[in-house]
Amino acid sequence: MGQEDKVECTVCGGIFSIDHGGKSNINQHIKTNRHKLTSDAEKSQKVSDFFNTKSFNENQNNLSADEGVFAYYHICKHNHSIRSMDCTSQLVRKLFNKKFSYGKTKTA
């Protein structure tokens, strides 16, 4: 049996021979636990679907920059306490941007 008789499953990555059975070897592979488990996992939602993407649109980039600058000025430049960010962040959220969320944990 040579290399040309082996195939790799694109679903589970399993390598098996189709030397003697051809299509029946493929059908037999599809019935294996490894293939079934991988196939079921592909049908379910991935954990990464529940998180934000790594690429931001321009508004998200601007908001992140605003939060960083605000934290810098609030903490470093004016020497305020990290605790005060919770209160200040709520004020900014009410007055300017509803999505602004830079509390003491994020600031730290």
Image (cartoon, grey):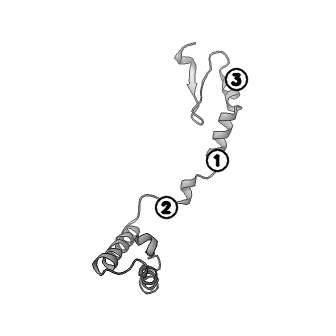
- Which quadrant holds the C terminus? bottom left
Q: Mark 1 and mark 2: span between their CA atoms? A: 21 Å
The residue sitting at 37% across, 67% down in the picture is: 61
In this rendering, the answer to whether 87 lies above or below 68 is: below
Left or right of 21 on screen, residue 103: left
Residue beneath label 1, please? 43
x and y, in percent, of residue 69 in the image: 32, 74
Task: Tell me the quarter of the image containing the N terminus.
Answer: top right
Question: Which of the 4 image quadrants contains residue 8?
Answer: top right
**C-alpha separation, residue under disc 1 versus residue under disc 3:** 24 Å
At 39% from the left edge and 72% from the top edge, which residue is drawn?
A: 63
Q: Is 83 rendered above or below residue 24?
A: below
Residue 87, percent from left and from top:
45, 84
Q: How many neighbours does mark 2 have within 10 angstroms: few (below 14), some (14-19), or many (20 or more)?
A: few
Residue wearing tag 3: 24
Q: Sequence order check: which comes first, mark 3 or mark 2?
A: 3
* Extreme-top residue of the structure: 1
Q: Nearer the viewer, mark 3 or mark 2?
A: 2
Q: Which residue is more in the foreground, 19 or 60?
A: 60
Amino acid residing under circle 2? Asn
| 97 and 9: which is toward the camera | 97
Residue type, mark 3 in image: Ser
User: Which numbered circle lies on residue 52?
Assistant: 2
Q: At numbered mark 2, what does the secondary structure look like: helix, strand or loop?
A: loop
Judge by depth and name the residue closer to the eye, 36 or 74.
74
- Residue 25 percent coordinates (x, y): 67, 23
Q: Is 62 drawn above or below residue 55 in the view shown?
A: below
Tag nearer the camera, 1 or 2: 2
Viewer-side label of 1, 3 = 1
Give me the C-alpha separation between circle 3 and circle 2: 43 Å
Instruction: Tell me the kind of residue under disc 1.
Output: Lys
User: Mark 1 falls on what kind of element?
Assistant: helix
